[in-house]
Image (cartoon, rainbow, N blue to C red):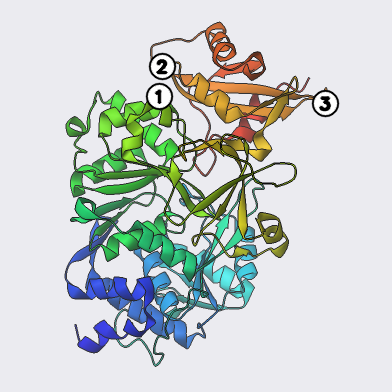
Amino acid sequence: MATDIREWWATAGGYVAELLSVLAEAPERPVLHYRGSWITGGEHLRSVTGIHRVLHESGVGHGTVVGVLTASNSPDILAVRHAAHLLRASVGHLRSANPGSSTEMLAIDDQLEMLRSTGAAALYADQDSADRAAELARSAGIALIGPDVPDARQVTPGGGPGPAVPAPWSPKDLAAIAFTSGSTGRPKGIRKSRRSWDSVVYGTIAQGREAEQITALVGTPLSQTVAQLADAALIDRGRLILLEAFAPDPWIHSVREHSVTRTFMATSHLYQILDRLEELGLSDAAAAGLSSLRHLDYAGSPAAAARLTEAVKLFGSILFQQYGTSESARISCLAPEDHTEPDLLATVGRPFPGVEIGICDLENGSPLSDGRTGEIRVRSPHVMDGYLDEALTARAIRDGWYHTGDIGYRDEHGYLHLLDRVAEMVKINGVKVYPTVVERAMMTIPRITQAVAYGFLGKDGLEHLHAAITVRRGVSVSMGEVRGHLANILSAAHVPEQINILDKIPLNSAGKPDKPRLRLEYVSHT
């Protein structure tokens, strides 16, 4: 590869210049595995170069946005973002607003609303998404860009990057507009700056043995949290195995085939792997062929202590629980050594370096001391700059603090205890009940494999609590036992009026228990 092609990005600085320079050191080294084939570092560089050139020719530059619509976890997602960041532009992914899986595409009306809300200057698409992208680009009146995409400005790898010399990056540059459906079901645009993006990337760089010959398995969407972990792995001279979607068997196969050392998943994914390995009669990592794993991140929802004990027994001391939100990025971590302490398994760990956590009163917002329960708020370099909706921003970010909407407390050792969402709390006979606390208590019954509790407002004008559970195959649990257990370790107010035993807990698109569906199907409206 010619020297000028290797070095044209250097003036940009920041994570992307360092990442591309690492790839240029050994351009023939395979770095990305997707749909059964390897892509070398040199091939990725040529893709970035070609995309950079066409983006620049299409008017993309400092402060503009590139819409992105590709197949799930396509390597193009990385290439177009790297090219856009070299132009000091940002990206907005349109396929899905789901942090757990992007296999199901959003409705075109939602995608068009998202595209218009970003003010995108161009839309990048691949062949898989060509028809949908063409309709979106026509409706939005913007340029369509892509390789072998009909009626698009064609992207060809390699060649020159175009006349634009990358200007030095600024922490104030917009890096991405991420979309999350949150509790409303409608995608909300989150503005993330390069300050936030680069700080997470560099905070994820591996150290010591962790950094040796990294092979990272990506099974959650590259448009979401795992993106910065992927960038960090490439800077660490690692490889990425890109799965289009998570499922236990392909995940297990990929770890075995590629000797995966690092991965990130949703908490529900971890449960699915544990259940699948139990079905296969595999009780430890060596027997399962998973002993190459050195680092397993999981996040998305609080984990049950009993399931974590299972996971530690199977995988060993490699588990990292991350607590965070789409808006805040990472907040706290339960480290591997914490997973061996039973009393800590009910926590979400301690703050990451550079993250400041406060607990504030739900009524007046005043700061609360350790041990007192209130809303969790966060201040860190990773926090979003705001929503696209300024009114939402004003409600969420106040006095420099991002208010998470989560309820919890910090103990005297600095560990954060996450109780529930503010919106999920119910009052039963005057007692504040947090459904997550009830779920964790039910999960201390060994025969229960998953539990979800949910509140609702009845026709009598009172709040009520119901629950659903799954149990291990071949065993049974009596409702009297569950109710007695909850009353004994919590209180009578924490005992659900109705508990349904299900074959499987329904999950929403984010891989979390689908409480609205449970309310619809199992709450009596008579």
Q: Evaluate if marks 2 and 1 touch, with contact meaning CB atoms under 8 Å apart.
A: yes
Dot 3 falls on a residue whose secondary structure is loop
Residue 360: give x, y in percent of width and height.
65, 44
Q: Earlier in the sequence, mark 3 or mark 2?
A: 2
Q: Earlier in the sequence, mark 3 or mark 1?
A: 1
Q: Give the vertical position of 338 relative to 172 (above or below).
A: above
Q: Which residue is more in the foreground, 103 or 162?
A: 162
Identify residue type, mark 1. Answer: Ala
Q: Give the vertical position of 338 relative to 161 (above or below).
A: above
Q: Evaluate if marks 3 and 2 touch, with contact meaning CB atoms under 8 Å apart.
A: no
- The residues tagged by marks 2 and 1 sit, at their Cα atoms, a distance apart of 7 Å
Task: Residue at 51%, 19% (x, y): give it.
Answer: 442
The disc placed on residue 423 is none
The residue to which callout 3 is attached is 461
Residue density around tag 1, few if under 14, some if 14–19, many if 20 or more, within 10 Å: some
The residue to which callout 1 is attached is 306
Q: Which residue is more in the foreground, 283 or 192?
A: 192
274 relative to 374 in the view: left or right: left
Identify residue type, mark 2. Answer: Pro
484 relative to 243 in the view: left or right: right
The C terminus, quarter of image: top right
Residue furthest bottom in the image: 163
Tell me, yes or no, if residue 156 can be seen here: no
The disc placed on residue 446 is 2
Identify residue type, mark 3. Answer: Gly
Dot 1 falls on a residue whose secondary structure is helix
- The residues tagged by marks 3 and 2 sit, at their Cα atoms, a distance apart of 36 Å
Task: Residue at 50%, 83% (x, y): give it.
Answer: 61
